[in-house]
Image: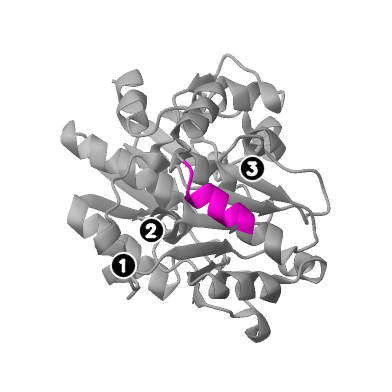
Amino acid sequence: MNFILAESTFLRYYCPLVIEGNKKGIKSIFFISKSGKYNCCLKKENYEKINDFCLRNNVEIRDLAEIKNFPGLTFLVEGVKIESTTSIHTTVSITYMTDFSLGYDAYIEKVDYVVLPSRFFAERYNKISNKNLYLGSPKYDISLSDNRILEKYNLTKKRKALVVFPRIRDLGKIDINKIYSVLNSMGYEILIKTRGKDPIPQSFKGGKCFEDDSWFPHTTMELIKVSDFVINFGSTSIKECVLMKTPVINFDIKPFPLVLEELYNFGYCENFSKDVDAQKLENSIKKLTESNLDVCFNDAIKKFLFVPGSSSSKILDRFN
């Protein structure tokens, strides 16, 4: 199997496929290229992580320019670098969260297949094609251990709240320090996750701050796993929270309508506007953390998503 690794972010989708491929006796090759972004594969810290995974999983690393000499099943993410492939490749593009809603039309005629989480996603964004394969997402074919995560990030066993930090663009719309104050008063250890391209200003570092410390397992998924609930600001992390069955408190502060708004309308999510009402926030936290929400999560997964854990196997079996 060939994997076009144009950005380190793609590892969260590729690594489970590699691991499943190894079980089936299928050799994998990463074809890497420079992106110039914060997640560029050739940055020293990123390359070291890629190389470590490859050494442990018998993956070969080659320059993207060499892919013309390696025919066969070739995976991409959102059609990135499709121009590097030729007719000798069977190209399969994996969708990245909801990015496909913007880029799909530009690459659908150039790839052979597109893997989407579910038919709902295709219908929701009017991206229907006979090239679509509704096989879930390999990103969620991963087993996470609370103890290993706590040790990895030097975290305590206290109750935890994960704050998926908003874009700098939207910070003026929310009193995030007031949110921290409520979480502190309730005894929660505050974890704050952002991306490398969105550093947290010093005055908003109200807890332990993380960027993309690990690409696989990805830091965001690890922190969701050990948290009692997530404070979200309209991020597509709502999908990760639902599939990992972690309750959400969402503040709607983005300058456009909620993406995947359907996932916010279940009992595992408490919705707020831009105003931070401390008492209401505290009440919502208690409600979410003291309730059995399995039925709500299962309903959302059944209606809009997919049961996680076997997508890599389904994808490889499809191209056996």
Residue, disc 2: 226
The magenta-colored residue range is 283-291
Q: 188 or 209, which lies in front?
A: 188
Q: Does the CB distance between marks 2 and 3 fall below 8 Å?
A: no
Quarter of image, res 49:
bottom left
* In the image, residue 234 lies in the stretch drawn in magenta: no
Q: Earlier in the sequence, mark 1 or mark 3?
A: 3
Spot occupied by residue 105 in the image (x, y as percentages of width and height): 70, 31
* In the image, residue 290 lies in the stretch drawn in magenta: yes
Task: Indicate which label's residue lies in the foreground, 2 or 3.
Answer: 2
Q: Which mark is residue 99?
A: 3
Residue at 59 percent across and 29 percent down: it is: 110
Secondary structure of the magenta portion, mostly? helix
Q: Which mark is residue 150?
A: 1
Q: Does the CB distance between marks 1 and 2 fall below 8 Å?
A: yes
Question: What is the CA distance from the residue labelled 1 to the residue labelled 3?
Answer: 31 Å
Q: Earlier in the sequence, mark 1 or mark 2?
A: 1
Under mark 1, the amino acid is Leu
**Side of 129 where 147 appears, left or right:** left
267 up-or-down from 56: above or below: above
Dot 1, how many residues are within 10 Å of its Cα: few (below 14), some (14-19), or many (20+)? some
